[in-house]
Image (cartoon, rainbow, N blue to C red):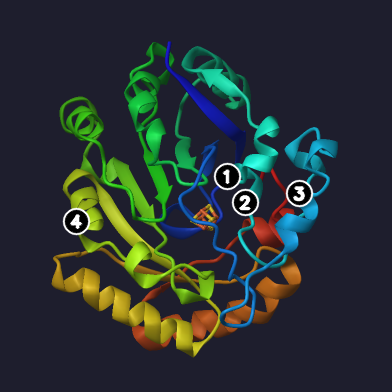
């Protein structure tokens, strides 16, 4: 039986991007190829917040008890191995049972499935066909993969999507959040136009850049150009830095204005003002 190491599985409102406001089940898989320790830090300096929290990692028994961070990756426990005891390895049957229990009508009606991370397109791709073909998943009409856009679809998963995902091209969304230098990751590791072009063959793709200022927006524009010359046709969103309300509130209006100036879309992070971005929201 296929299994997935699950960091979080919860029902909430999608707070970002194309499906902002849509009731969604979030399946957060464990593992990421990045650390994004640069978010919220002066250029070239890495956040140490998760390392400080990790000194007492074994004291935390569930995600709800974990501290939120103001710098670095706000979902750090979904990939940092020091927190892996919080993420059980679940069978597909176990995951589907848990999903049915959280859906308001006990089955899929109009809700959306968001497969997120960490980076959900790492090794777990091999388990998704079993998950998506499960008999109790037939009512599911729309999926989003929230990805950093660096992982190619495997041959098997690509084949599965092309031959078995019959709900329609635009019912499969790749919400790609390429990491700019504000994240601390390197351009050559983060900006992968060929990967995005592969996603575009399978579904609707949009880019969502997390930015704080005009320097980040200029870098986003360079990345967009790079994707466009390779054939990317989807929309571009700017989303404010800020996993906690104080940082988000400092940035959101300015980012909306910068998006307007570029003719790009603005993505809020509704989970911050609505739910304080707590784990499980
Ligand atoms: S890619 Fe996403 S999940 Fe991975 S470290 Fe960066 S912000 Fe966190």
- Label 1 CB less than 8 angstroms from ligand 1: yes
Identify the image quadrant of the N terminus. top left
- Between the C-alphas of marks 2 and 1, the distance is 8 Å
For image coordinates 85% across by 38% down, the residue present is: 59
Q: Closer to the N terminus: mark 4 or mark 3? A: 3
Q: Earlier in the sequence, mark 3 or mark 2?
A: 3
Q: Quadrant of residue 70?
A: bottom right
Which mark lies nearer to you, 3 or 2? 3
Image position of 275 with respect to 172: above or below: below
- Which residue corresponds to the image point at 23% horizontal and 74% vertical from the top-left? 226
In the depicted structure, whether residue 166 falls above or below residue 98: below
Label 2 crowd bin: few (<14), some (14–19), many (20+), radius 10 Å: some
Q: Position of residue 150 (x, y in %)?
A: 34, 54
Count neighbours of disc 1 (C-alpha within 10 A) and say few if under 14, some if 14 to 19, many if 20 or more.
Answer: many
Dots 3, 1 in contact, CB < 8 A: no
Secondary structure beneath disc 1?
loop
Q: Nearer the viewer, residue 279 or 105?
A: 279
SS of the residue under disc 3: helix
Residue at the disc numbered 1: 79
Which residue is under mark 3?
54
> How far is mark 3 from mark 2, CA to CA?
13 Å
- Rendering coords of residue 274 (x, y %): 70, 56
Which residue is tagged 4?
197
Quarter residue 207 falls in: bottom left
Q: Which residue is rendered at x = 37% and y = 71% of the image?
A: 187
Dot 3: within a 10 Å radius of its alpha carbon, few (fewer than 14), some, or many (20 or more) residues?
some
Disc number placed over residue 75 in the picture, else none:
2
Q: Is residue 210 left or right of residue 191?
A: right
For marks 4 and 1, the one nearer the N-term is 1
């Amino acid at each position: 039986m296929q299994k997935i190491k699950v960091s979080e599985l919860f029902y909430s409102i999608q707070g970002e991007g194309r499906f902002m406001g849509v009731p969604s089940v979030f399946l957060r898989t464990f593992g990421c190829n990045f650390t994004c320790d640069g978010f919220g830090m002066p250029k070239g300096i890495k956040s140490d917040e998760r390392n400080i929290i990790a000194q007492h990692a074994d004291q935390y028994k569930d995600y709800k008890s974990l501290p939120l961070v103001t710098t670095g990756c706000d979902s750090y426990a979904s990939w940092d191995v020091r927190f892996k005891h919080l993420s059980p390895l679940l069978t597909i049957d176990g995951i589907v049972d848990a999903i049915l229990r959280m859906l308001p009508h006990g089955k899929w009606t109009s809700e959306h499935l968001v497969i997120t991370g960490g980076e959900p397109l790492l090794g777990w791709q091999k388990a998704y066909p079993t998950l998506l073909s499960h008999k109790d998943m037939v009512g599911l009409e729309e999926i989003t993969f929230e990805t950093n856009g660096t992982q190619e679809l495997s041959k098997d998963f690509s084949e599965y999507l092309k031959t078995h995902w019959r709900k329609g091209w635009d019912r499969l969304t790749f919400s790609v959040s390429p990491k700019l230098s504000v994240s601390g990751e390197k351009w050559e590791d983060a900006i992968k136009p060929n990967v995005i072009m592969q996603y575009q063959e399978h579904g609707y793709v949009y880019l969502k850049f997390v930015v704080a200022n005009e320097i980040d927006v200029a870098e986003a524009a360079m990345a967009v150009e790079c994707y466009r010359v390779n054939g990317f046709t989807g929309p571009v969103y700017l989303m404010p830095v800020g996993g906690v309300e104080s940082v988000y509130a400092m940035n959101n209006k300015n980012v909306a204005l910068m998006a307007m100036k570029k003719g790009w879309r603005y993505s809020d992070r509704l989970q911050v003002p609505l739910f304080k971005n707590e784990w499980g929201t």
